Amino acid sequence: RLQSTEALFSILGGAAYRKDEELSLAVGEALAAYADAFGNAKWSNESEIWPDDYDEVFAFDLPPHQHVLYTLFQREVTHTNPLKRNASAAVLLALVAHASRQANLGRMDRAMVKQVSKNINLFQNSFIKLLSDPKSKQLSRESCCRGLAACRGLAHTLGDDGGILNERLLKAFGQTTYGGSAMIETESQARERRNERDGADADFPETEIGGAAGITESALGAFREMAAAAISLGRPDTVYS
């Protein structure tokens, strides 16, 4: 069981993933099925308190639904390899989508659904963080956009009006009059992204596109993608509520 799970995680950002990034979608579905295989039974080594840093021994001792989420949040999403981070977005989406399907079928007593619901804030924060990553690729951004919509859908299914999720999402996209925005890059981040894309001189002066002071090109692009995903899912209120 543990070897198979680690083999799936090793695909994320690996050689096979570099050839076909859509493998992350298949890995996500497999990990979601594994996380939900436990049903609603009890596991003797369940833990509600997780170490701040990834601990393999601790992870391997957890039940499937906690093992997958702990490994994702404590190792994959925060990995220094941008390919790992990109690939983790599709896995996060698969987990939220699977939990949402089960909740819509009235199976809210399943351990996996409860675990995802309890950590819905971590899912949303991870999607926002990955979406604002200057090294984020197309599939990763699409997964994040759909994942954010799925988070709100799951919250509604479980009887939450989504108000807190909406506030966090709007603030992350710079829609409030206070605080910063996860979607606003620093100058160094913007230079790094453009240099990687265009091979431009790092000291060459950059200008922002007009009419969006403080919001970068990648931020606006990500917001457009998120809006398109929300509308295609029939949930435009995810963006505008």
Image (spheres, grey):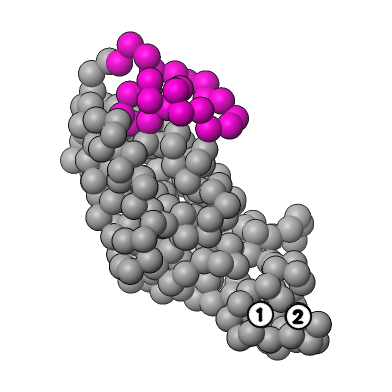
Under mark 2, the amino acid is: Ala
| 89 left or right, relative to 126 | left
Residue 70 lies in quadrant? top left
Name the residue nearer the viewer: 60 or 150.
Answer: 60
Q: Quadrant of the N terminus?
A: top left
Residue at 75% x, 55% y: name it. 179
Badge 1 element: helix
Whether the magenta-drawn stretch holds residue 25 is answered as no
Nearer-N-terminus badge (2/1): 1
Magenta stretch containing residue 50, yes or no? yes
Q: Residue at x 36, y 61 (%)?
A: 15
The percent coordinates of residue 75 (x first, y second) are 50, 41
The magenta stretch spans which residues? 43-67
Q: Residue at x 24, y 46 (%)?
A: 30
Q: Residue furthest front?
A: 15
Residue at the limit of the structure toward the top, as seen here: 44
Q: Which residue is mark 2?
A: 202
The answer, for residue 228, to whether it is visible in the render is yes
Q: Is residue 100 left or right of residue 177?
A: left
Q: Main secondary structure of the magenta part?
A: loop
Position above or below: 145 against 32: below
Instruction: Quadrant for residue 186, please give it.
Output: bottom right
CA–CA distance in space, label 2 to label 1: 7 Å
Q: Give the image location of residue 175, x and y in percent.
A: 65, 64
- Residue assigned mark 1: 195
Q: Residues within 10 Å of mark 1 (few under 14, many from 20)?
A: some
Kindly indicate whether the residue at mark 1 contacts the one at mark 2 (C-beta within 8 angstroms): yes
Residue type marked 1: Asn
On screen, residue 53 versus residue 127, left or right, reads right
